[in-house]
């Protein structure tokens, strides 16, 4: 490389008359560094401000939500999209609450037993507020029925009737048995009971009517002649058959008696149940299908009155949690206060069960059981007829929640299904409740990234959520919007019952809002950040026992927040103060520049200066991006390097090939680097390394650029400026330090007061540039140069030095110049001859370069 001696008497760009025009054109004054609030247009206190209860700055989102609410068709649900902290949920809940008041209150729903098929419970729809009353009426009726049945069935008249029925049967049985006994006696047979069985046995003929006939023993029978024995056997067989027929007759008499008792029981139960059921029906006669249910209800009690009174069967016994048997209970699924409007429900844990409801199961003695009383409602049940708000990200974290919600919305029905059956296909007991009609508007809340991810993977999203409400982050800072923003502040103050905020506090909040928006002409709409700051400032006012909150308390809250979140930043400044992190804010260096970057970590953002270096050497024209090579550089950063390469070729490679290679690196950078905001810094360092003109380390620079050398805006400009300001403050102000930014970023400047004061005192400087030429002139304190008619850059300019080095490399590449070899040591007398030879070589080289340049210009 052709080397030029590094000048030690460098002049700061701020005092260099050669670039005075550039300095004056790019320098920013104090008024351009922030947006100062007009105190004359700010009320004296929030006491005089009416609270805002509206969508501040969200007119588009409000119109979208209202469109979704007004369209009564399937699929017109709402997907609210906006960054976290905008207050989407609060604003939507307010709007829904206002709209819900104008809508009719939806019906109540209950589940009751299906006496025909217990596995399919029936759903009944009642007027709003009637479900608990119906449940209480039914349960009270059961208690009254049971009490009256017990009284009726324990009465003497009932027992007398039972005794009468049994006496009649018993008398008939005795008469039939007596007749059979007499018939047997006529055949010398006696009816006896042996081994719990009635049989006929032969007896001796009695000589006396009063004497009891004696049973014949087997020996007595054996002593008889065969004819008599055969006669006895025939008589016994005949009577046994008649005894069997009598047994059937007696059994029939028992059945008749039993039927008479059952009929009696049913008649009594009917007399008790039907009047009470009829009263319930008259009270709730408008309920569809209630008549059929009450009819089946009464029939079931009448038919099972004996089991009910015995209380031995589990189905007819009180349950663990209720004195009413499960089959006669009423399970309230949803209920609403009459004339309260439509419900607005927010479900903060949207699992499949919490959304769609589920059926619980009980384990008793190792047996799993369930019934309709264990049906539990979900958020969709409670929001039916109204509105349901859900966080999309939370719902997507829950298995099958999205599929269940989509199925319910598309079918228009709420059908309970067992998730265990869907996942495991187990054969555990379950029920299939009757589905309930679903009419609901669902509002999903999500950040833009989540919304677009769902859109990519869920093709049916547009058919289920046809309305997208986009929430913006910022609000144009007009006078009218400033007044509305102060109304929003007053809303927080009045709602949380805080101390009033005075004029200075309101101005400080407006300034901080623009600072959060990073735009002088905008206000941030991040409600959570604003609300936190208001409450924290109020707390500091309380600690000082101040009657009003002032700008001092706002600044105290901001300082405390910065301290709380400043751990990571403090670690960096410790490294900088100890010299571990290498940053220079004074002096001159070749191929070295202070670039600016922004660190994002959770809710923390701060700017840092970063040393960027460039090295050049003769080569094939490639620029090595070290960050990209080690996979620490992102695609946007790589794009910036390619744009820089294109700029160099367009400016200096029109007449010759660029025979040099370069390497760029962010020193002491161990994390990922992305973005193109360092493109101007990289090009400046590269040109410094080629031209051998040092860069003033008092400056830091940020900015993107295009192939034409036009500087483009970047993000995080305030954090970047303040980061380098803090570095200069740490190492000591010299009066010539400053930051160079794109001119388009002027509107984004909302710097903290300490930086503004330093600029006002000329301790720190901020310059806004349009082109790379302006940046180079400020950094190297030298004109960038202009082309003359011969295609040569003006003498002693930056680009002239670049072309001189490039021409030198071209000559070496063409073989017109050989790199000088190390000369051997000679005697002192030869020094003069050596100097003459070197001078002759330099003259020859310059002539060759000039001749080659002119030749190429002619070819062009």
Image (cartoon, rainbow, N blue to C red):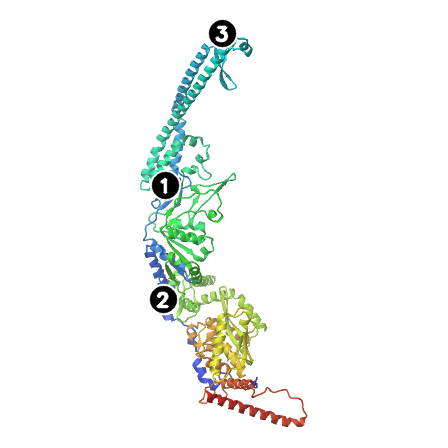
- Seen in the picture, residue 45 relative to 781 is either above or below; the reply is above
Q: Residues within 10 Å of mark 1 (few under 14, many from 20)?
A: some
Question: Dividing the picture into quarters, in which one does residue 119 lie?
Answer: top left
Q: Which residue lies furthest to the front in this view?
A: 226
Q: From the image, tell me which residue sits under label 1.
A: 134
Residue 495 in view here: no
Q: Where is residue 159 in the image (x, y as percent from the top left)?
A: 40, 24
Give the camera-side residue of 345 and 362.
362
Q: Residue furthest right?
A: 827
Q: From the image, tell me which residue sits under label 3.
A: 205
Q: How far apart are marks 2 and 1 (CA)?
A: 53 Å
Q: From the image, tell me which residue sits under label 2.
A: 483
Q: What element carries label 3?
A: loop
Q: Judge depth for marks 2 and 1 and give the one in front.
A: 1
737 to the left or right of 32: right
Split into 4 quadrants, where in the image is the C terminus? bottom left
338 to the left or right of 705: left
- Residue 772 is labelled as none
Split into 4 quadrants, where in the image is the N terminus? bottom right
- Seen in the picture, residue 281 relative to 93 is either above or below; the reply is above
Residue 135 in view here: yes
Q: Where is residue 369 in the image (x, y as percent from the top left)?
A: 47, 40
Q: How crowded is mark 2: few (under 14 residues within 10 Å), some or many (20 or more)?
A: some
């Amino acid at each position: 490389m052709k080397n030029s001696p590094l000048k030690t008497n460098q002049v700061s760009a701020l005092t260099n008359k050669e670039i005075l025009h550039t300095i004056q054109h790019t320098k920013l004054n104090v008024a351009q560094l922030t947006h100062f609030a007009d105190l004359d247009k700010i009320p004296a206190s929030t006491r005089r401000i009416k609270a805002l209860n509206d969508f501040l700055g969200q007119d588009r989102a409000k119109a979208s939500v209202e469109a979704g609410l007004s369209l009564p068709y399937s699929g017109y649900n709402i997907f609210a999209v906006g960054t976290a902290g905008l207050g989407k949920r609060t604003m939507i809940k307010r709007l829904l609450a206002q709209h819900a008041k104008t809508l009719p209150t939806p019906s109540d729903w209950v589940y009751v037993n299906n006496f025909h098929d217990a596995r399919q419970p029936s759903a009944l729809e009642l007027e709003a507020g009637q479900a608990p009353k119906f449940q209480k009426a039914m349960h009270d009726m059961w208690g009254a029925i049971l009490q009256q049945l017990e009284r009726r069935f324990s009465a003497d008249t009932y027992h007398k009737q039972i005794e009468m029925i049994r006496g009649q049967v018993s008398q008939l049985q005795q008469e039939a048995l007596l007749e059979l006994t007499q018939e047997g006696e006529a055949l010398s047979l006696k009816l006896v009971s042996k081994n719990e069985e009635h049989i006929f046995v032969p007896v001796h003929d009695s000589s006396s009517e009063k004497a009891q006939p004696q049973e014949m023993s087997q020996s007595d029978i054996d002593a008889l002649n065969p004819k008599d024995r055969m006669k006895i056997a025939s008589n016994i067989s005949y009577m046994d058959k008649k005894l069997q027929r009598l047994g059937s007759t007696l059994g029939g008499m028992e059945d008749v008696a039993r039927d008479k008792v059952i009929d009696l029981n049913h008649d009594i139960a009917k007399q008790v149940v039907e009047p009470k059921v009829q009263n319930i029906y008259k009270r709730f006669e408008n309920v569809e299908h209630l008549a059929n249910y009450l009819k089946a209800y009464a029939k079931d009690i009448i038919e099972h009155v004996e089991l009910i009174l015995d209380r031995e069967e589990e189905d007819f016994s009180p349950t663990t949690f209720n004195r009413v048997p499960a089959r006669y209970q009423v399970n309230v699924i949803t209920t609403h206060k009459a004339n309260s409007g439509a419900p607005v429900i927010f479900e903060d844990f949207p699992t499949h069960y919490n959304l769609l409801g589920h059926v619980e199961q009980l384990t008793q003695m190792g047996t799993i059981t369930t019934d309709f009383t264990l049906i539990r409602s979900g958020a969709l049940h409670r929001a039916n007829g109204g509105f349901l708000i859900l966080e999309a990200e939370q719902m997507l974290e829950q298995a099958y929640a999205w599929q269940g919600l989509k199925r319910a919305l598309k079918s228009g029905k709420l059908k309970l299904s067992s998730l265990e059956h869907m996942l495991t296909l187990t054969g555990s007991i379950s029920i299939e409740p009757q589905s309930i009609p679903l009419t609901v508007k669902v509002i999903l809340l999500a950040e833009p990234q989540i919304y677009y991810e769902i859109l990519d993977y869920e093709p049916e999203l547009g058919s289920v959520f046809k309305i997208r409400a986009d929430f913006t982050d910022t609000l144009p800072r007009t006078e009218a919007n400033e007044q509305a923003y102060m109304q929003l502040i007053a809303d927080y103050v009045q709602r949380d019952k805080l101390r009033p905020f005075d004029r200075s506090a309101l101005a400080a909040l407006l300034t901080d809002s623009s600072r959060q928006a990073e735009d002088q002409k905008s206000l941030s709409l991040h409600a959570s950040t604003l609300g936190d700051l208001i409450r924290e400032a109020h707390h500091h006012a309380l600690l000082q026992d101040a009657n009003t909150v002032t700008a001092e308390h706002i600044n105290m809250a901001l300082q405390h927040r910065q301290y709380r979140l400043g751990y990571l930043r403090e670690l960096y400044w410790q490294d900088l103060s100890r010299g571990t992190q290498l940053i220079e804010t004074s002096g001159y260096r070749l191929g070295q520049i202070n670039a600016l970057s922004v660190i994002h970590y959770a809710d923390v953002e701060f700017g840092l200066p970063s040393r960027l270096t460039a090295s050049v050497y003769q080569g094939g024209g490639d620029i090595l991006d070290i960050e990209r090579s080690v996979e620490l550089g992102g695609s946007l950063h790589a794009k910036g390097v390619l744009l820089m390469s294109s700029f160099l070729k367009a400016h200096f490679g029109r007449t010759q090939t660029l025979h040099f290679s370069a390497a760029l690196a962010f020193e002491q950078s161990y994390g990922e680097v992305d973005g193109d905001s360092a493109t101007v810094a990289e090009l400046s360092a590269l040109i410094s390394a080629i031209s051998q003109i040092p860069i003033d380390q008092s400056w830091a620079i940020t900015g993107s650029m295009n192939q034409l050398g036009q500087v483009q805006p970047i993000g995080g400009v305030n954090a970047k400026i303040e980061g380098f300001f803090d570095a200069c403050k740490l190492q000591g102000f010299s009066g010539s330090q400053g930051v160079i930014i794109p001119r388009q970023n002027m509107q984004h400047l909302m710097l903290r007061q300490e930086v503004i004061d330093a600029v006002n005192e000329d301790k720190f400087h901020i310059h806004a540039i349009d082109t790379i030429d302006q940046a180079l002139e400020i950094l190297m304190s030298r004109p960038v140069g202009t082309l003359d008619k011969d295609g040569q850059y003006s003498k002693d300019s930056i680009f002239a030095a670049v072309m001189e080095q490039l021409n030198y490399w071209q000559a070496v590449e063409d073989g017109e110049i050989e790199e000088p070899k190390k000369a051997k040591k000679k005697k002192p007398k030869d020094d003069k001859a050596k100097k003459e030879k070197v001078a002759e070589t330099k003259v020859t080289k310059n002539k060759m370069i000039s001749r080659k340049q002119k030749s190429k210009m002619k070819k062009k």
